[in-house]
Amino acid sequence: MRAKSRRGILLLGLLLLTIPMAGTQGVRAEGSFQVRNDQASLQFPDSVTFTATIQSTTTITSVILEYGVDQQTCGTVVAKAFPQFDTGQNVNAAWTWEMKQSGSLPPGAKIWWRWLATDTNGNQSSTNPNSVQWLDTKHDWQTVSGEDINLHWYRGGNSLGQELHQAAVDGLQRLEHDAGLSTDGPVDLYIYANTSDMKDAILYEPSWTGGMAFPAYNIVIIGISPDQIDWGKRTEVHELTHVLVGHLTFSCLSDVPTWLDEGLAVYSEGKLEDSSQRQLDQAIQDDTLFSVRSLSGGFSEIPDKADLSYSESYSIVKFLIEQYSRDQMTSLLLALRDGMTPDEALQSVYGFNVDGLESAWRASIGAKPRASTANATPTALPTPVPTIHPISGIPAAEITPYATPPMATPGTAPTQTVATQPGRPPLSLTLTLIFTGCVLLIVFGFIGLAFFMAISDRRRKKDS
């Protein structure tokens, strides 16, 4: 299921224990700096602490930590932290990245960091970047790799890992054949033995989460118990679709409507489930279908409405791919990547806008023409995992997860339930209000002063 996060994105430790990573490193530069015990200690999933001992022949006056996460971004993103330390020729520096304050990284993300030091003469030196994998190692992870899929799991034996890996590989092949979607690099799938274990690895996840995709990191995590293998295979393909669509459409301009993203993800699973097809058929018969425009934003949190939204999205995407072509679907996604609105992109590729799509799609499935779609407004799409803003105030990562719930009750489709984050007024608005208030105070002050002076002058004239 999709959970936009269009505002976040973007990132081996022992659970609740500290594991030092990266060994001793010596760096010699202009000021003869040397760095020892350069390491990152993970307290998964809560925090990571960076420490180093920096030595110099002169007094060290400044130490800065630069850090970030390997991910797909619109530009180079570097966060900076300023650890407290006592100046001298031998400095111990430490700084902790609190995930509970910034928001969680996806398991498997690669964190990098380096130190910058300056001495009293202005000489500066930086260490070579180090890295550590953000992953809890209380589980005995096993890995099977091949054909652009790295599948990691820890329970169920080798046969389970091979089975799930093959299902993911088959899913990639089907996505390329049916929808023209392909990978631009290996995707890592982390298979937890159940949803409880998976939730322990992610902070602030929705309570219903059973699987999540992080396109910016090429990472998918899913909780699959032994009695959910079939659901797990479908979910693998569903979440892989989000990763591939996310990569293909990635830009600072893209705006992919939810019906397209989720429709492709459900379409990639194969044939629509019988219960979902029956619900869709009933909505066609009762003329209770949602408008395509209303499916452009977040889906309803009401189970029946959410289920129908996914089924409709599947049907719309199926119509576009099978009535037209796979190549046109790819062109549509690329047009959205390049900054076209959904109306503009559809018009350029198919010759109709969103309303035209709705008319053509309804005719193809035997639904009644829609009387009006002008007042259909897409709802805002909430984000279950907060956007990450490192303590320094420079965004080091922005997570854009796409979440799937655990296996639904037989006969029902997955349901999305998310909670919105409270917003704050824009800074520009706040400054404008403050400025306006100051101006008004000055104006009223002058008016009051003039009034007071006029009265005083009148009294003096009267007395004289």
Image (spheres, rainbow, N blue to C red):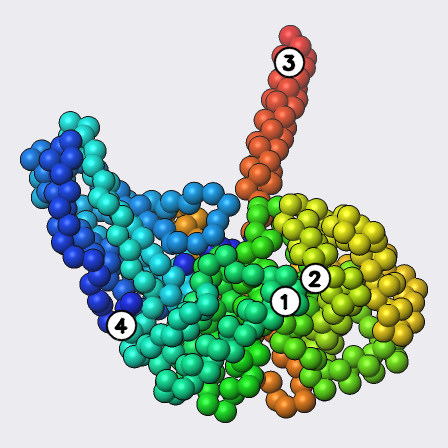
Give the label, 3 or 1, closer to the camera.
1
Residue 226 appears in the picture as rendered: yes
178 above or below 113? below
Residue 332, position as x, y percentages in the image:
70, 54
Q: Secondary structure at mark 2?
A: helix
For the residues bearing labels 2 and 1, Cβ distance under 8 angstroms: yes
Look at label 1 and name its amino acid: His
Look at label 2 and name its amino acid: Arg
In the foreground, 210 or 382: 210
Per the rendering, the mark at residue 14 is 4
For the residues bearing labels 3 and 2, Cβ distance under 8 angstroms: no
Give the label, 3 or 4, closer to the camera.
4
Return the disc, 3 or 1, that comes first in the chain's sequence. Answer: 1
Q: Secondary structure at mark 4?
A: loop
Taking the image as shown, residue 14 lies to the left or right of residue 181, namely left
**Which quarter of the rendering shows the N terminus?**
bottom right
Return the disc, 4 or 2, that comes first in the chain's sequence. Answer: 4
Q: Residue at x 58, y 66 (%)?
A: 241
Look at label 3 and name its amino acid: Asp
Q: Quadrant of residue 97?
A: bottom left
118 above or below 293? above
Q: CA distance from mark 3 to mark 1?
A: 91 Å
Disc 2 designates what residue? Answer: 326
Residue 429, position as x, y percentages in the image:
60, 40
Residue 399 appears in the picture as rendered: no
Disc 1 designates what residue? Answer: 177
Disc 3 designates what residue? Answer: 457
For the residues bearing labels 3 and 4, Cβ distance under 8 angstroms: no
Q: CA distance from mark 4 to mark 1?
A: 41 Å
Q: CA distance from mark 2 to mark 1?
A: 8 Å
Q: CA distance from mark 3 to mark 2?
A: 86 Å
